[in-house]
Image: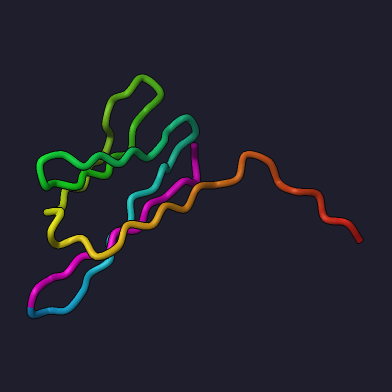
Amino acid sequence: MKGDRVEIMIDAGGEGTRTYEVAATRAGRRVEITNRRGIVEVSEVTRTGTAVRTARFMGSRVLALVEYPIADEQEPQSD
């Protein structure tokens, strides 16, 4: 859903850490995470399942992977 995003922090060796972000930028898109054979893949995917943008990282280098889902409905605030 538009607004969903995933933040990936990796170990960049001697440079310290780096942070990357993949977000669903348009309506109807979502962010999917897969972990296969030591590779972590984060993709922005359309409704039909076509990957628009993909980021791949070695699993041994990933320090943190944080998902930030957007809420479907806003909770009403009571005064």
Q: Residue furthest top?
A: 48
Residue 12's x, y, as percent?
13, 70
Residue 60's x, y, as percent?
12, 59
Q: Specify the quadrant of the image occupied by residue 30.
A: top left
Going by the image, does 73 lie left or right of 53? right
Going by the image, does 36 lie left or right of 24? left
Q: Residue at x 81, y 49 (%)?
A: 76
Query: What range is drawn magenta here?
Result: 1-13
Closer to the camera in the image, 54 or 32? 32
Does 57 appear in magenta? no
Q: Residue at x 49, y 40 (%)?
A: 2
Q: Residue at x 42, y 52 (%)?
A: 67
Above-or-below relation of 18 to 58 = below
Color scheme of the displayed model: rainbow
Q: Residue at x 41, y 23 (%)?
A: 47
Going by the image, does 73 lie left or right of 56? right
Dividing the image into 4 quarters, which one contains the C terminus?
bottom right
Residue 42's x, y, as percent?
27, 44
